[in-house]
Image: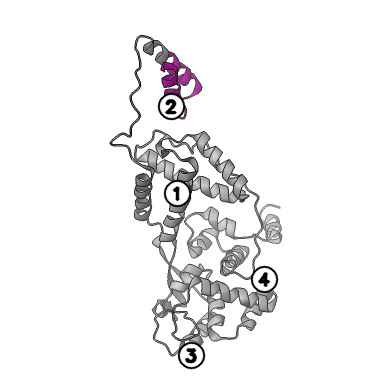
Amino acid sequence: MKEQFINEVLRTMQTSLNNAQMLQLQTVLQQELARVEIIPLAEQAKPDEVTNEQLLSMFLDAKRVEGCSDKTVRYYENTLKKLFSGINMLMVQVKTEDLRSYLSEYRQRTSCSKANIDNLRRIFSSFFSWLEDENYILKSPVRRIHKVKSEKQVKETYSDETLESLRDGCTCLRDLAMIDLLTSTGIRVSELVKLNRDDINFEGRECIVFGKGSKERPVYFDARTKVHLKNYLDSRTDDNPALFVTLQNPHKRLEISGVEIRVRELGRKLDVGRVHPHKFRRTLATKAIDKGMPVEQVQRLLGHSKIETTMEYAMVDQNNVKQSHRKFLS
């Protein structure tokens, strides 16, 4: 019984102590316990023991207070509930080896990408760091699980010819205005569908969008977009305050899925490859950096909290890198 007790203590402390300290702890425990007898109590739940469900509820409340969207909170909840059922033990007792085993088994079972596994790791890190901050555990077991390296994929952008083809292929004023607004502002599709007519400042050719993390920011559009937006709004007979609405009666606010379906159908009809709203955003970032806009300003334009995210969006033209090397370094 003493040996079992010592092993359990060492298992609990292994993430908090180095090897030398662990050996010293083992020696002290063996010496002190040699003079006493350990009598096991009947296994029973402690009255103040917090369940996984209670911890999850408190963690999600903390994320809501931090400003996470409902979609993000649901993603955290679903991911952690799968972890609970997969490991089937109290989270305050989970060790690094338990999480490594879970991630390894999950990848083999689902054949998911390395990027997906790293997303899980980041969510686990957020949860267990919160447990550590709230003093439910001494040290997060995720600390020793490093970032999962994944292959960098070169993501495509739209060429000028493709953008013109998309504009020419629009059969209604709404789609033309929508394509132009996505192209000239680089806003997220979630930001696009939240826009109202009153949000548009035609005089200054700008609008305020409500982005991730409940942050507002101004974005700007060109003269062509201004003309096409005005033509579209002048053609409408409904009283819906939304900037973009469905084509059929009753005219409801256009949803994200509606935008995605529309541009995907347009791409198929024109045979210009896969068309997705997010690709307009990446195209704007790439063009802005290639034309010399400071990356800090592109970051502000896109509403990114980290400049590394902006650099991942922008596919820098290698020819421009060569020209800049000759200009500044040769």
On the rendered image, what quadrant is the N terminus found in? top left
Q: Quadrant of residue 182?
A: bottom right
Q: Can you identify the residue that label 2 sits on?
A: 13
Mark 2, residues whose alpha carbon is within 10 Å: few (<14), some, or many (≥20)? some
Residue 307 covered by magenta stretch: no
Which of marks 1 and 3 precedes in the sequence? Answer: 1
- For numbered disc 1, what is the local secondary structure? helix
Which of marks 1 and 4 precedes in the sequence? Answer: 1
- Asked if disc 2 and disc 3 are in contact, CB closer than 8 Å, the reply is no
- Asked if disc 3 and disc 1 are in contact, CB closer than 8 Å, the reply is no
Mark 4, residues whose alpha carbon is within 10 Å: few (<14), some, or many (≥20)? few
User: Type of residue at label 4?
Assistant: Ser
Q: Position of residue 131 (x, y in %)?
A: 38, 41
The kind of secondary structure the magenta stretch mainly shows is helix
Residue 12 covered by magenta stretch: yes
Q: Can you identify the residue that label 3 sits on?
A: 235
- For numbered disc 3, what is the local secondary structure? helix
Q: Which mark is residue 159?
A: 4
226 with respect to 276 (left or right):
left
Q: Relative to 11, say whether 28 is above or below.
A: above
Q: Which residues are magenta?
A: 1-27
Q: Quadrant of residue 198?
A: bottom left
User: Type of residue at label 1?
Assistant: Lys
Q: Position of residue 292 (x, y in %)?
A: 60, 63
Q: Can you identify the residue that label 1 sits on?
A: 81
327 with respect to 214 (left or right):
right
- For numbered disc 2, what is the local secondary structure? helix
CA–CA distance between discs 4 and 1?
43 Å
Q: Which residue occupies 71% across, 52% down?
A: 330
Mark 1, residues whose alpha carbon is within 10 Å: few (<14), some, or many (≥20)? some
- For numbered disc 4, what is the local secondary structure? loop
